Amino acid sequence: MTLPADPPSCAEAEELRLEVRALEQFVHLAPVALLRTRLSGQVLMMNPVAARWLGPWCGTEGHLNLFEILAPLCPDLPARVQAFRRPVGVVCDNLRVVLPPTGQDGAHPLALGLTLMRLSADPDALMAVFTDQSAQLRLEGRPTDGDA
């Protein structure tokens, strides 16, 4: 998005405000976990689904780092990001991450597919998208780590 040279008119500013509000609602209501991180894994932004799915593993240090959260499950994730030399593109596509069950999630672990992308809008940022694959794996008859 390029900004105009002149300040926006009141009507343009209102239109932009409405577009930003619609985008915020879209991100917050998305049925997938969305995160924006630095290349270091530092979480800059996450939607409510991401907070619900990853929250139990975030700790209480006050800062969130996606690579630290996933280190026990995907220890090579930082290396994958460093090895990805292109400024834009998919670092990993639908990488399976199985989170152990928590007391609130019931008896089954949470099987997620992680897609990690570098974005052109911010060369120091990553977009992480997690999709829930738990039901799909159970329907396929493929056990997740905690299933019998």
Image (cartoon, rainbow, N blue to C red):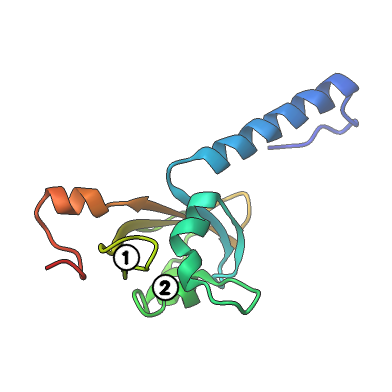
How busy is the neighbourhood of tag 1: few (under 14 within 10 Å), some, or many (20 plus)? some
Residue 25, which numbered label? none
Which residue is most to the top? 11
Q: Which residue is mark 2?
A: 70
The part of the image, by quadrant, that contains residue 92 is bottom left
The amino acid on which the numbered mark 2 sits, given as a three-letter code, is Leu
- Is residue 98 among the parts visible in the rendering? yes
Residue at the location (52% across, 58% down)? Answer: 51
- Residue at (75, 29) in percent of width and height: 16
**Is residue 99 shown left or right of residue 81?**
left
**Numbered disc 1: secondary structure:** strand
Where is residue 88 drawn, in percent x and y? 50, 54
In-front residue for pair 127/30 = 30
Residue 71 x/y as whole percent: 41, 78
**Residue at the limit of the structure toward the left, as seen here:** 141
Q: Residues within 10 Å of mark 2 (few under 14, many from 20)?
A: some
Left/right of residue 122 with respect to residue 133 in the rendered view:
right
Give the Cα distance between marks 1 and 2.
8 Å
Q: Position of residue 4 (x, y in %)?
A: 82, 32
Q: Quadrant of residue 83?
A: bottom left
Residue position marked by numbered label 1 in the rendering: 97
Look at 14% across and 62% down and name the residue there. Answer: 143
- All told, the count of numbered labels is 2
Question: In which quadrant is the N terminus drawn?
Answer: top right
Location of residue 50 with respect to 81 vertically, above or below: above
Going from the N terminus, do you reach mark 1 or mark 2 first? 2
Q: Quadrant of the C terminus?
A: bottom left
Query: What residue lies at 60% left-to-right and 36% top-to-bottom?
Result: 25
Image position, residue 12 (x, y; %): 82, 23
Kind of residue at disc 1: Val
Label 1 close to label 2 by CB (< 8 Å): yes
